[in-house]
Image: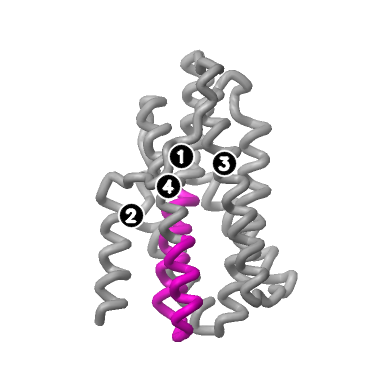
Amino acid sequence: MDALLTTFDTALRTLFVKPHAAQACPTLPDRATELSEDEKRRSAGLMRVNHVGEVCAQALYTAQAFATKNEALRAHFTRACVEETDHLAWTAQRLEELGSRPSLLNPLWYAGAFGLGLLAGRLGDPVSLGFVEETETQVGAHLQSHLDRLPPGDHASRAIVAQMHDDELRHAQDAHAAGAMELPQPVKHLMRAAAKVMTTVAQRI
């Protein structure tokens, strides 16, 4: 019952409560960000996608913590979830600074990611960890592409994305070290296709 209540509480906090970061938002204090309206819109679209990714990360880690019977692994997923809360808060803050909003479909994204995380967790801990490793590896590549696409002068967004990129790759390495199973290539391709749909839609809605 405690695990169920915690899972429900995390969902409500992710979707309906302003997140608060434990770590200060990354900045480049010696570089001022000055953007045109077109650059603001471009940055906002990319940061909205990144915010959706963090909503999904909360759902995935919460579901996997709920599904596992391994207490040490549950603690591992819970720590990762807490770290991802920093990313959630940073991206939400940056969207506000850009005069934009999160995706209107966040409840849908959360529900879908939670279902995938629960399924991965039910298939066993090595599969669940393999899902984390592949997800975070793909997210790392996705964030690297955003560093290439963000306006060069958007130092505020770029500092956030660069830190997120490093953190996500560390999460992938942690999952691998914890015993992740290599996922089959067809599964990896499906994950990339699903992520493509999500990022395309979230950038606009």
State how far apart marks 3 and 1 are (Cα): 17 Å
Q: Is residue 180 left or right of residue 64?
A: right
Horizontal and vertical percent for residue 18? 28, 45
Q: Residue at x 26, y 59 (%)?
A: 12
Q: Which of label 3 and label 1 is nearer to you?
A: 3
Q: Residue at x 50, y 44 (%)?
A: 50
Magenta region's main secondary structure? helix
The residue carrying mark 4 is 86
State how far apart marks 3 and 2 are (Cα): 21 Å
Q: What is the three-letter code of the residue carrying label 2?
A: Thr
Q: Residues within 10 Å of mark 3 (few under 14, many from 20)?
A: some
The residue carrying mark 3 is 163
Q: Is residue 198 left or right of residue 90?
A: right
Q: Which of label 4 and label 1 is nearer to you?
A: 4
The residue carrying mark 1 is 48
Question: Magenta segment range?
Answer: 52-80
